[in-house]
Amino acid sequence: MEPAVEMARSGSVDFVGLECLAERTLVTGLIERAADPAKGYDRRLERRLGPLLPAAVANRCGIVTNLGSANPHAAGERIAAMCKANGLSGITVAMLGGDDLSGSLDDVVWEGDPLEEGGRWLGAHAYLGVEGMAEAFREGASIVVTGRVADSSLFAAPAIAALDLDAEALAGALTAGHLLECGGQLTGGNLAATKGRQLDAHDLANLGYPTATIERDGSFVLGVLDGKPARLDLVSTTLQLLYEVHDPRLYHTPDLTLDFGNLLLEEVGENRVRVSGARGAGRPESLKAIGFVKRPGEVADVEITYAGEGAIDRAMVARDVLRERVESLGLHDYAVDLVGIDSVLGAVAHLAPGYAPPELRVHISARCTEAEEAQAVEDEVYALTLSGPAGGASLRSERRPHVSVVSGRVARSSVNVSVERLVS
Amino acid sequence: MRISDVAAGRAGDKGDVLDLTLVAYDDEGYRTLVHRVRARDVEQWLAHVAPSPVVRYELPNVRALKFVASRALAGGVYRSLHAGMHWQKAAIWLLLDKELPDA
């Protein structure tokens, strides 16, 4: 939370955005809301907003966040209560609704059959745009809390409200939003580059998060607070610009399809990049929808370590024993990997001769149709400690539910964006 | 010469789709990437771990190539049998470590 609190305290930032909702993070919120209608917002809400609220209010810095997850209404009530408890009165909190499609699943055109293999719905959401958020800020909200909205729209909304941007400039604000949405990934985090500034552990532990200074024409300058360690240059900006964008000339946001084909990036100072030339390519007629489907059974994830002289040979024997045992259970949908060799990027063609890592983990993931089957897989790994190669140690076991993410499109007319307000 | 000598990179994903970005350090590097790293090369490098058709997009204005593998992550993060979740965050090394193919 420090980057957001520092930005709010700096006095040079008008709004901070907290984007906390990955594609599948909503599943947790949906499960919690089903158990308790007052829950379902992000569990980290108190921890994150606790230190930020007083700093933001003192510096007249607005907050926009999707910490509302599956329950923005409950999140807004919680935030208003937190304001009150901190002696912050007269703060307007706006909650954005309308993304929840659980009552209108049939209005969505899904890809494929979402309920195949005996699936049942956990929930579904539309990705909303700036509509509602921008109005809420225009009408005096200090804090806007949402569920599922497009990340680029989340960050663009305050700029649109504050600058009264026209359609031309909207492309720029959404591009700025897209660049800011992953925080430190714009400023040197998760950056695989052998050239240019290399950040050390201390830099990364204190990484400067990005800011965007947006002009009325939609151009903007990216930066970090003075003195913060960061790598914000053409390489870092381009990697984030294209991150999870499939066709860079047709990047769909709910508000506008963006074309990055003519974008101009310029380094205009240390850790300062100017971005201009963002263009729109029409407004999508429908909104993206995403649903979560629970299917029967679960995935068993079990691990065991082999260490010391000959660890690699014993780990390979353990892998073969496991394969034979699991096959004998009638299970065929599984993978056994050696963590330290082939568990991430797949089979290694040639290990260096004499390669002898001091320890290795053997990992099995098995897709099981019922809990008892998952237990049997776990038991087979535990059996290795007694009946397998020597020294099987440090076991760990987990179960994951079978949850599939399904995508679709929903007409704007089937989605009713709403804004609720609370004053603390 | 390896790809990492001329470009930086990052992997991302949405649903079933794996996308890999390479950004060249300079104009010459970008020309090298365009001529020597084709969609079919990437398709081959992914085949053993995430088989999928691959489409390449060129962005000369920012000296970048994108490779989009639309069916590489069938069923998404929860469905994967890889150890741990989000193995694909490391997938960029399926490209960066490779010797540049001949043009």
Image (tube, rainbow, N blue to C red):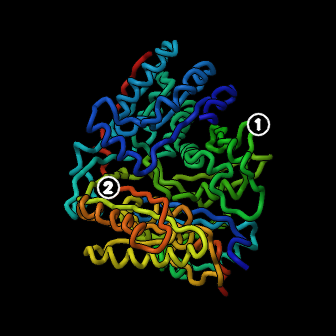
Q: Nearer the viewer, residue A363 or A169?
A: A363
Q: Chain of mark 1?
A: A
The kind of residue on which mark 2 rests is Pro
Image-based side of A71 in relation to A266, left or right: left
| Residue on which the image places disc 2 | A401
| SS under mark 2 | strand
At x 47% / y 33%, what residue is drawn?
A134
Question: Crowding at label 1, few (<14), some or many (≥20) Cα neighbours within 10 Å?
Answer: few
Q: x%, y% of residue A59?
A: 63, 21
Give the numbered dot on residue A226: 1
Residue B30 showing in the rendered view: yes
At x 70% / y 63%, what residue is drawn?
A193
Answer yes or no: are tags 2 and 1 on the same subunit.
yes
Q: Chain of mark 2?
A: A
The quarter of the displayed image where residue A227 is located = top right
| SS under mark 1 | loop
The kind of residue on which mark 1 rests is Asp
Question: In the rendered image of this protein, does residue A48 appear above or below residue A56?
Answer: below
User: What whole-number distance in Å separates the C-alpha atoms at marks 2 and 1?
Assistant: 45 Å
Q: x%, y% of residue B44?
A: 52, 82
